[in-house]
Image (spheres, rainbow, N blue to C red):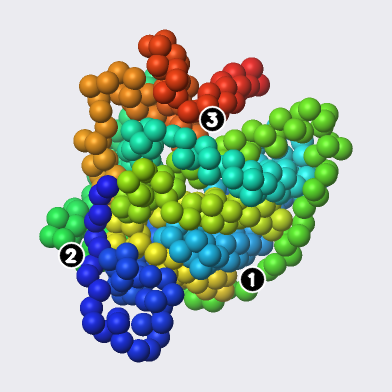
Amino acid sequence: MVRRGCAVATDVHRGQGPVSALDRFFHVSERGSTVRTELVAGLAIWLTMAYILFVNPAILGSVPDPTGRSLPFDQVLTVTALVAGVMTILMGVVANYPFALAAGLGLNAFVAFTLVGGFGLTWPQAMGVIVLEGLAITVLVLTGFREAVLNAIPMDLKRAIGIGIGLFIAFIGLVNAGVVIKGEGTPVTLNPDFTSLRMLTFALGFVITAGLVARRMRGALLVGILATTVLAIVINEGFGGGRLWEAVGPDVARIPSRVVGTPDFSLLGDFSLTGVFDAVPFLTAVALVVSVMLSDFFDTMGTVIGIAGEAGLLDREGKLPGINRVLLIDSLAAAAGGAASASSNTTYIESAAGVSEGGRTGLTAVVVGALFLVSIVASPLAGVIPPEATAPVLVIVGYFMMTLVREIDWADPGIGIPALLTVGMMPFTYSITNGVGAGFIAYTAIAVLRGRWREVHPLLYAVSAVFVWYFVRGLLA
């Protein structure tokens, strides 16, 4: 597998002191990294993820429940940072992998617009659904089922998942920067306004970051984000942002008037575990829990496979050592997110930014988690980073992950066609789960039609059947 950005450990790290202790605890040198590299990687991940501190409150706070209650922006921001910080630190300490967690985009929209806006659940009832699906996935992890499904996936499909995530990340970057917009008569199109200062900022940031990466500068992605942020502040403060400069959060790309905010933890524990069964019929409630669970289950699976493959952390059989600890923390994070009214927390594809910087251990995750905890009181400072600064990094990380494309056996239709569906469906439907499902169904169906049904792991048949239900349920909803 691809190994990129790994620095060779120095004799300093083998000595005594705090650095040596961190090295030993997280096995930093053993994985070909250094403590400094892990710290830089953690900062890079946090910078690419900090937007969730403002996007999550904006989404969850946009829909009032049937009682007329809306979730206050500042309260959601506080619990978003808290859960992301605690669970990411646990991921680093318990699992020792560079995976960061936060409130999942898509899942939070499902909570707001489907559970609350569509089915008329109150906010405590909707968050109870998230707690239930998180607990259900935790049971699947403890029984070994989730790991068994992960290990049943053929290596070529695992590579396709990584490629698809790379293309998805790059697409997200282009959308966040405003380069790709919704078209008139087409689903998407190129933004025609290249004279906007927002587009100029992204373009300059991309050139700067790509140039640093091409020169193999250590910490290139981090330096690119910081340089583009400074550029964005200069443009926004000097020219008022210009046309099409749309803020993701308050005071984005502006010098903050204050650095410290006041946290409000009122939403902690504000959920009803059984409330959904009082609000809708029993079978409907079960279907809602299962639907969220499937999305959470396979989103994380795809993310972990893709990023671990890019980091060179998979063994020769394509398995991630200690994967059960990763999956356990991730499932508990889903339940914790619901219990805190932050929505389901999941492993973030932006973790790939840290891997591209050389992060290989849980120390990277601990740094990310610590920065999220600091964000509880320093949210105004975190809000300075604009999407135009992180978008170039997402596009370049997509390039890193796309290099796996050469390792797929495209000459075999039984592999190539499922791989194509896996790769294409992720960005085009804005869902990792849809890509994984399409690939699974195509792989098993083609194997059966070719008379090679014995080569397919029995679990893949079961999972493919579940995905058929998942897609049909969506069509009939």
Identify the residue at image location x=32%, y=64%.
31
For label 2, count other residues whose C-alpha is less than 10 Å away and answer few (under 14), some (14-19) or many (20+).
some
In the picture of the structure, the residue carrying the numbered disc 3 is 459
**Vertical arrangement, residue 350 with respect to residue 414, above or below:** below
Query: Which quarter of the rendered picture does the C terminus lie within?
Result: top right
For label 1, count other residues whose C-alpha is less than 10 Å away and answer few (under 14), some (14-19) or many (20+).
some
Can residue 286 be seen here? The reply is yes
Mark 2 against mark 3, which lies toward the viewer?
Answer: 3
Q: Quadrant of residue 46?
A: bottom left
* Circle 3: element type: helix
- Mark-to-mark CA distance, 2 and 3: 44 Å
Can residue 442 be seen here? The reply is no
Q: Residue furthest right?
A: 278
Closest to the observer, 267 or 401 = 401
**Vertical arrangement, residue 249 with respect to residue 187, above or below:** below
Q: Amino acid at mark 1?
A: Pro
Mark drawn on residue 473:
none
Q: Amino acid at mark 3?
A: Leu
Closest to the observer, 1 or 379 = 1
In the picture of the structure, the residue carrying the numbered disc 1 is 263
Q: Position of residue 260 (x, y in %)?
A: 54, 76
Say whether disc 2 or disc 3 marks the residue closer to the N-terminus.
Answer: 2
Identify the residue at image location x=58%, y=53%.
328
* Circle 2: element type: loop
Q: Quadrant of residue 191?
A: top left
Q: Residue furthest front?
A: 454
Say whether disc 3 or disc 1 marks the residue closer to the N-terminus.
Answer: 1
Identify the residue at image location x=27%, y=47%.
1
Give the left or right position of residue 350, taking residue 345 as reference: left
Mark drawn on residue 217:
2
